[in-house]
Image (tube, grey):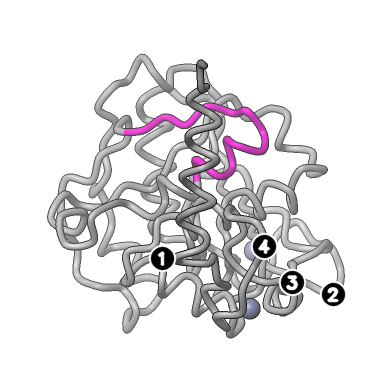
Amino acid sequence: MTVSLNTLRTAGRTVLDLVYPPCCVLCRVRVSHDRLVICDDCASGLISIDAPYCERCGHPLDNPVASCAACKGRTFYFDGALSGFQFNRPLQDLIHQLKYRNRPGIGRFLGSLLAKRVEGEPEIPHITAVVPVPLHPLRIRERGYNQSVYIARGISDETGIPVLENVLVRNRNTPTQTSLSPDARMANVEGVFEVGRVEAVRDATVSLVDDIFTTGATINSCARALLKAGAERVFALTVARA
Ligand SMILES: [Zn+2]
Ligand SMILES: [Zn+2]
């Protein structure tokens, strides 16, 4: 009798599910499907950011405008930024677990949610590759992985858009940005990113991928490096907006 690899995998997973039944990572209630990270109840707490938003930075607004108060006077190198969800409690918990509790699968799950949320947006069909915002190698060693890579893979799972890993590199570790003003954040990350393989992005329309859009300083510095390397247009997709 021949047993296919898939049958073995399914059998193995069934045994694993009996020993460690898959649970919602937020409320620990059992979930039936092994790729599901959170239960329907917790998922209903995620609030999507819907139009209208600022055409430059994606900030949610009451009325559509070309440039909002938050980005007035700032130079952006990206052509548009979209965020999937408000940074409320369930999403804060998920992103915390993704970054500090060794749960890369949450990144993939959030990436696929984000892709479903933005699939009708006019920029999406033009994007030929997604580029995760890089972490410094020291930070990767601490965390074990770059969470943005997993978010990008989740986007790719849904859309088929390839992920360009290790194209953009972070050449300096920077202090945490949380206490800094928008201008100080911009100075903090200036010149931090470099494109290692210029031919991979030349003339391409790419989208940067990150977990949270706060002031856009990191995304902006990455976008600048990509344009300098010859990318034609750069967008940004983030799971949340703080
Ligand atoms: Zn739950
Ligand atoms: Zn704006």
Residue furthest to the front in view is 1
Residue drawn at x 29%, y 21% as measured from the top left: 197
The magenta segment is: 152-165
Look at discs 1 and 2 and give the one toward the viewer. 1
Residue drawn at x 42%, y 43% as measured from the top left: 132
The local crowd at label 2, few if under 14, some if 14 to 19, many if 20 or more residues have their Cα within 10 Å, is: few
Q: Which residue has dot 3 on it? A: 40
Q: Considering only order in the chain, which callout, 3 or 2, is on the residue closer to the N terminus?
A: 3
Q: Is residue 45 above or below residue 77?
A: below
Q: Position of residue 45 (x, y in %)?
A: 71, 79
Q: Position of residue 100 (x, y in %)?
A: 31, 71
Residue drawn at x 41%, y 60% as measured from the top left: 217
Q: Mark 1 touching mark 2, by CB under 8 A?
A: no
Q: Which mark is residue 62?
A: 2
The local crowd at label 1, few if under 14, some if 14 to 19, many if 20 or more residues have their Cα within 10 Å, is: many
Q: Amino acid at mark 1?
A: Leu
Left or right of 193, for residue 240: right
Q: Mark 2 touching mark 3, by CB under 8 A?
A: no
Q: Which residue has dot 1 on it? A: 98
Q: Considering only order in the chain, which callout, 2 or 1, is on the residue closer to the N terminus?
A: 2
Q: Position of residue 191 (x, y in %)?
A: 24, 47
Q: CA distance from mark 1 to mark 2?
A: 31 Å
Residue 61: image quadrant is bottom right
Q: Which mark is residue 32?
A: 4
Q: Is residue 3 above or below residue 44?
A: above
